[in-house]
Image (cartoon, rainbow, N blue to C red):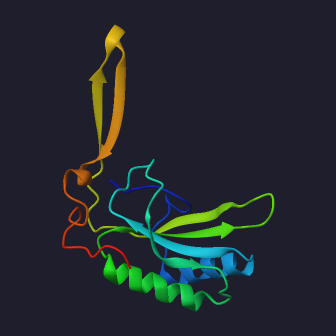
Amino acid sequence: MRLTQGQFSFLPDLTDEEITKQVQYALDQGWAVAVEFTDDPHPRNSYWTMWGNPMFDLRDAKGVMMEIDACRTAHPEQYVKVLAFDSSYGFETVRMSYLINRPAVEPGFELLRSEGPGRRIGYTVRSYATGRPPGDRYGGETRHGA
């Protein structure tokens, strides 16, 4: 099951050239760019691990692309995304977020139902991959941190 989170998620994976253009657009707007990764793709998991520090003062996408390549190399079987943060007064929020790397096999999600008092039914969604320990969810051993 293909994970669909962020911009461009229903399109084919972006090429490096397309990623470079998107990153350059964000930098041209004055937005800070960051790279994050995770092996827990749950839609409500908003706390991905940040790769290095946010890149506040860059003006050229090449610097961001170097960090993207390093993160992909260190975490080839994890989800990696690019975020662009706009610190302008009145916005102060993420303006762009899109996946740039994904595991070769995405096992999908499981819907769990539980019954409560008064015939109440509760639902939980979890990734099949989270049945394995962090760092070992999508194949080989993964180094944590950067």
Count of labels shown?
A: 0
Q: Is residue 39 above or below residue 100?
A: above
Using the rendered view, name the quadrant where residue 100 is placed: bottom left
* Place of residue 73 in the rendered image (x, y in percent of width and height, measured from the top left): 34, 83
Viewer-proximal residue among 64 and 10:
64
Task: Please give the name of the residue rendered at 34% of the width and 40% of the height, measured from the top-left corner.
Answer: 125
Which residue corresponds to the image point at 47% horizontal and 85% vertical from the top-left?
67
Q: Residue at x 31, y 73 (%)?
A: 144
Q: Is residue 31 left or right of residue 131?
A: right
Residue 143: x, y in percent?
27, 76
Horizontally, residue 91 falls left or right of residue 66, namely: right
Query: Where is residue 139 drawn, in percent x and y?
Result: 19, 68
Q: Residue furthest top?
A: 118
- Left/right of residue 98 with respect to residue 115 in the rendered view: right
Q: Is residue 54 above or below residue 95?
A: below
Q: Is residue 130 left or right of residue 25?
A: left
Residue at the spot 81% in from the left edge and 62% down from the top edge: 89
Q: Quadrant of the C terminus?
A: bottom left
**Residue 26 in the image, given as x and y percentages of width and height:** 67, 75
